[in-house]
Every structure is written in C-alpha cells, then in structure tokens.
Image (tube, rainbow, N blue to C red):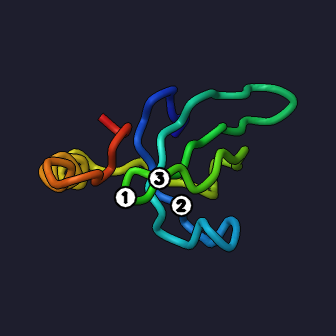
Amino acid sequence: MKLNEYDVVRSTRSLAPNVPDGTTGTIMMVYEAPRLAYEVEFIEAGEILSISTVMPEDVELLSSEELEILKQDSKGPNQHEGLF
C-alpha cells in the first residue's frame, strides 16, 4: 500500500540510534523514482529526532485507533506536538 504525505507512521525497525523500532513520524514527502521512498520526520515528546528517507518496508501506517490514542496523549505537555 502506498502511503501519502502527512500520513502518521511507525518505524518497523531501528533506523538510527535515535530512531528505534516503533518510533512515530509523519510522512513529509513521497518519492516515486527511481524507487518508492518516503521522507519522514520522526518525533518523540515534541522533539524532532530525525528527518530520514526510508523505504516502504521501514514504516507502517498507524491505525485510526492508534491515531486517536496519540491525539488523546497529545493533550499533555509537548506530547506528539506537530503530529496533528
């Protein structure tokens, strides 16, 4: 499944020392050539951890239920700031 700009995703593996498996991010750009890839801004506690170019197998789309939980959590100070 192709993802779109501004989709909220989770890393499926460790992508860098500061982007472990399960880190939440937002797709900022979709690259179609030479191969499908995504520019993702990974965030934790309102801080940008990394802006990385990743392959489709490196991220998965969050479900609507997971997004709702993130939205509820974001009501606390600096939680997921910038995701919504």
Q: Is residue 27 above or below residue 78?
A: above
Quadrant of residue 17 within the rendered picture: bottom right
Is residue 3 shown left or right of residue 84? right
* Residue 23 locus on image (x, y percent): 48, 63
Q: Nearer the viewer, mark 2 or mark 1?
A: 1
Number of residues whose C-alpha sits closer than 10 Å to that of mark 3, classed few (under 14), some (14–19) or many (20 or more): few
> How far apart are the two marked residues, 3 and 1, measured between alpha carbons?
6 Å
* Residue 84 locus on image (x, y percent): 29, 34
Is residue 15 shown left or right of residue 82? right
> How far apart are the two marked residues, 3 and 2, measured between alpha carbons?
16 Å
Number of residues whose C-alpha sits closer than 10 Å to that of mark 2, classed few (under 14), some (14–19) or many (20 or more): many
Number of residues whose C-alpha sits closer than 10 Å to that of mark 1, classed few (under 14), some (14–19) or many (20 or more): some
Q: Amino acid at mark 1?
A: Ala
* Residue 80 locus on image (x, y percent): 33, 50
- Which of the labelled discs sits on residue 47, or is there none? 3
- Which of the labelled discs sits on residue 23, or is there none? none
Residue that badge 2 annotates: 11
Q: Amino acid at mark 3?
A: Glu
Near-viewer residue (7 or 33)? 7
Residue that badge 1 annotates: 45
Is residue 60 shown left or right of residue 20? left
Q: Amino acid at mark 2?
A: Ser
